Image (tube, rainbow, N blue to C red):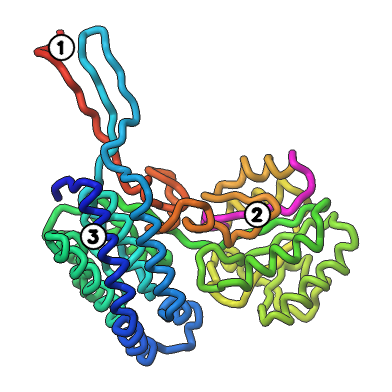
Amino acid sequence: MKLLNTDIKNKVLNSMISIIDGDREKILKANSKDCELFDKKDRAMYDRLVVNDKKIDGMINSVREIMEQEDPVGKTKSERNLENGLTIKNKTAPFGTIMIIYESRPDVTIEAAVLAFKANNKILLKGGKEAYHSNKALEACWHKALQENGLDTSWIQLLHMNRTETQEFLKNPPEKLDLIVPRGGEKLIAFVKEHAKCAVLVSGRGNNFLYVAKDADWEKSIKVILNAKTHKISACNALDKILIDSAVPDYEEKLKELDSILTEKGVSILVDEQTGSILSDESVIKDESIWHEEFLAMKCCIGTVQGLDEAIEKINKFSGGHSSTVMTNDPDKAIKFMEQVDSAAVYHNASTRFTDGGAMGVGAELAISTDKLHHRGPLGLEQLVTNKYYVFGDGQIRN
């Protein structure tokens, strides 16, 4: 796609703000069709599917935030003047065409597209069938905004394909794909990695851990655990696993208190053998594979560890590499945890729920990357560009 100047991109986004607001009733009506057809037993997926006025306001705000951010394309990262007279500049450049595959969340149709477009990328949106009507309504908003400003609607396209068609598309894309972002569970990620012919940036599972050290502030720990576990169970930054140090003062009483508080909030609890010897009413974990699972439900595991090193080892073995928290009053212990735990975001005395573009000050996000190349964590506007070298000479040749 050709390079657009910042002014025209911002005009499209400004149009989009008005169009979304003006088409609010159409969007809500389309979403109600999707919600009526959806099996509400899957609470996490249903929560992600629902669009209301607050979510539409959030979509508008996301577009406005990106419109106000600096254009990430064409920025000079470095410049060198060599002895041979060459001037070498390394500048940011668009990826080209990005494909994102996601489920349920219609707001991704706005957030992913606004980021890709402002970074001068074409984007192909493969949403889930459960959000078909919602996504169609939002795509229509994008096309209206592009056409109002004299641009082709191919900049932002919604794809409607079943699994077999998607597999064929990945194997033999009808156009060049530069980056694919699968935003979903491990099965989706494995499917895309198996069939894609271009770079895949993984927005991996959550399965986030929190470790309570022996010197932690217990009241603060309870507050953080409750927020991380119950605030929004459908989010990839929700808490699933809690590790309690066996050296916590009044260990048994505090375990029972935590169990009682979580149970009152409707959280079902699984425990390891040592914890189960105290919390005898809870189910004991028989298969350690449960420690790998992302729940997206009012469910958690509580385990007991003997110190910081064991906590770090367990987290690195089982977590999804997304977010991990240590509760401690010892800054040295916190730094050791944060340096040695292999997660995209590591926290000291704070909820994992902050692993989010908006909450981290990045703005709208394409996804939370758990990959290490080319970026880890929230994929915001600045992360949706690559780079290339501009080499200026005057007839130089290499001997």
**Which residue extends farthest left?**
395
State the extent of the magenta-drawn residues as a range.
Answer: 319-332
Q: Quadrant of residue 100?
A: bottom left
Give the Cα distance between marks 2 and 1. Answer: 53 Å
Kind of element beneath mark 1 = loop
Q: Which amino acid, mark 1?
A: Arg
Q: Quadrant of residue 137?
A: bottom left
Q: Which residue corresponds to mark 1?
A: 398
Q: Which amino acid, mark 2?
A: Thr
> Can you tell which mark lies on residue 12?
3
Front residue of 251 and 60: 60
Q: Which residue sits at x=23%, y=60%?
A: 12
Q: Nearer the viewer, mark 3 or mark 1?
A: 3
Give x and y (percent) for residue 373. Answer: 39, 43
Q: Which residue corresponds to mark 2?
A: 325
Q: Which amino acid, mark 3?
A: Val
Q: Nearer the viewer, mark 2 or mark 3?
A: 3
Q: Which residue sits at x=37%, y=92%?
A: 36
Q: Check residue 69 for magenta coloring.
A: no
10 Å crowding of disc 3: few (<14), some (14-19), many (20+): many
Give x and y (percent) for residue 113. Answer: 29, 61
Residue 221 seen by the camera? yes
Q: Which residue sits at x=15%, y=17%?
A: 393
